[in-house]
Image (cartoon, helix red, strand yellow):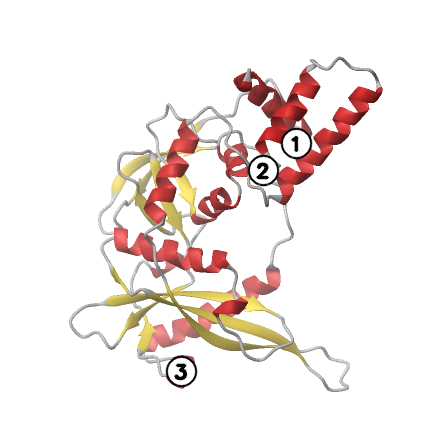
């Protein structure tokens, strides 16, 4: 009975999203030259579209989708197994411009192999890491830093902002993960307390990926946190100046492997996972279902109708 309820739930969620209830997800294949260690090329065939448990082809699991799984397993499953996306949000175009500007600035120091002024001012003995793969590691859409998970058909990957090299280590090349962030707050100083937990998980995933690719990686990561402040004069021109703050964080990536294996188990299953209690999207779906249930009851609908079964199933899965 529970499996039937879950099936009914899936049908309504599909219909709410405007999907064709009778169309199966389209499965495509793409053969490309890829690398599972970043040092040697191998030929892989990637799945395109929702995850296919029966396919031997690789499924590309991005850092953001692992974060989605941590946020809400049900929303992750709907996206990666059924192809149902969460409602889209507006792109952070201002943040993207800050990201581009910072990359250009640090690339100048990478080219000259000198220590950036921001690092000198903070007493950090590091410089941008010079490597041919930097452009690809930054390309989160087409490449990124990636690794094929042994015993699975999953390639985990993520696009970095920057990598520095620790100049204090003379006997080994130790890399430092760096991430750029932008905000606009009425304050001058920032610490780790001002950053959300997903920022920390993000750099830990990058640390894990570089270690799996054979690099020595420092536990210390840095956030270049840029705060935008407007001009306070009487000019008609609006100026927004971003002031950078360097925030260090001690990462621990021991959680990454177990979570990726949980993701693989979730993707392999035909059972809908439970949603997160904090998921606003699932709460919205639950509210819609409760309204539908009230309307059905007001029209003297039988209590064993599929719609009411669906409401009960979603209530079990969300809140």
Q: Secondary structure at mark 1?
A: loop
The reply to whether residue 87 is visible in this rendering is no
Say left or right for 283 vs 258.
right
Q: Nearer the viewer, residue 205 or 36?
A: 205
Say left or right for 285 vs 45.
right
State the CA–CA distance, disc 2 to disc 3.
Answer: 42 Å
Q: Residue at x 39, y 26 (%)?
A: 53
Q: Nearer the viewer, residue 109 or 233?
A: 233
> Would you place residue 139 above or below residue 114 in this image?
above
> Would you place residue 123 above or below residue 219 in this image?
below
> Would you place residue 56 above or below residue 122 in this image?
above
Marks 2 and 3 in Cβ contact (< 8 Å): no
Where residue 10 sits in the image (x, y, percent)?
59, 25
**Residue on which disc 2 sits:** 85
Q: Nearer the viewer, residue 202 or 136?
A: 202
Say left or right for 161 vs 18.
left
Where residue 222 sits in the image (x, y, percent)?
40, 69
The disc placed on residue 122 is: 3
State the CA–CA distance, disc 1 to disc 2.
Answer: 8 Å
- For residue 237, which quarter of the picture? bottom right
State the CA–CA distance, disc 1 to disc 3.
Answer: 50 Å
Question: Which part of the image, by quadrant, shows the N terminus?
Answer: top right
The mark that comes first in sequence, 1 or 2, is 1
Question: Which part of the image, by quadrant, shows the C terminus?
Answer: top right
**Residue on which disc 1 sits:** 17
The mark that comes first in sequence, 2 or 3, is 2
As drawn, the residue found furthest toward the right would be 299
Q: Secondary structure at mark 3?
A: loop
């Amino acid at each position: 009975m529970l499996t039937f309820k879950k099936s009914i739930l899936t049908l309504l969620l599909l219909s709410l999203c405007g999907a064709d209830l009778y169309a199966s997800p389209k499965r495509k294949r793409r053969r490309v030259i890829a690398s599972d260690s970043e040092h040697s090329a191998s030929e892989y065939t990637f799945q395109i579209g929702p995850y296919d448990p029966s396919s031997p082809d690789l499924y590309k699991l991005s850092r953001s989708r692992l974060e989605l799984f941590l946020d809400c397993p049900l929303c992750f499953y709907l996206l990666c197994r059924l192809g149902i996306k969460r409602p889209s949000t507006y792109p952070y175009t201002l943040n993207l411009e800050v990201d581009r500007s910072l990359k250009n600035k640090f690339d100048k120091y990478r080219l000259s192999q000198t220590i950036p002024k921001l690092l000198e001012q903070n007493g950090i003995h590091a410089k941008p890491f010079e490597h041919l793969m930097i452009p690809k590691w930054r390309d989160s859409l087409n490449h990124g830093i990636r690794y094929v998970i042994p015993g699975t058909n999953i390639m985990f990957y993520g696009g970095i902002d920057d990598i520095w090299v620790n100049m204090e280590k003379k006997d080994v090349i130790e890399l430092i993960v760096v991430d750029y962030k932008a905000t606009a707050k009425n304050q001058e100083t920032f610490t780790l307390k001002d950053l959300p937990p997903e920022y920390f998980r993000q750099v830990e995933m990058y640390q894990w990926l570089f270690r799996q690719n054979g690099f020595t990686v420092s536990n210390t990561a840095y956030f270049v946190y840029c705060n935008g402040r407007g001009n306070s004069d009487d000019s008609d021109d609006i100026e927004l100046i971003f002031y950078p703050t360097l925030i260090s964080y001690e990462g621990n990536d021991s959680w990454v492997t177990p979570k990726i294996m949980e993701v693989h188990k979730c993707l392999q299953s035909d059972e809908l996972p439970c949603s997160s209690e904090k998921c606003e999207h699932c709460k919205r779906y639950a509210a819609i279902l409760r309204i539908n249930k009230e309307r059905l009851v007001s029209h003297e609908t039988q209590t064993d109708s599929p719609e009411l079964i669906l409401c009960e199933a979603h209530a079990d899965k969300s809140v």
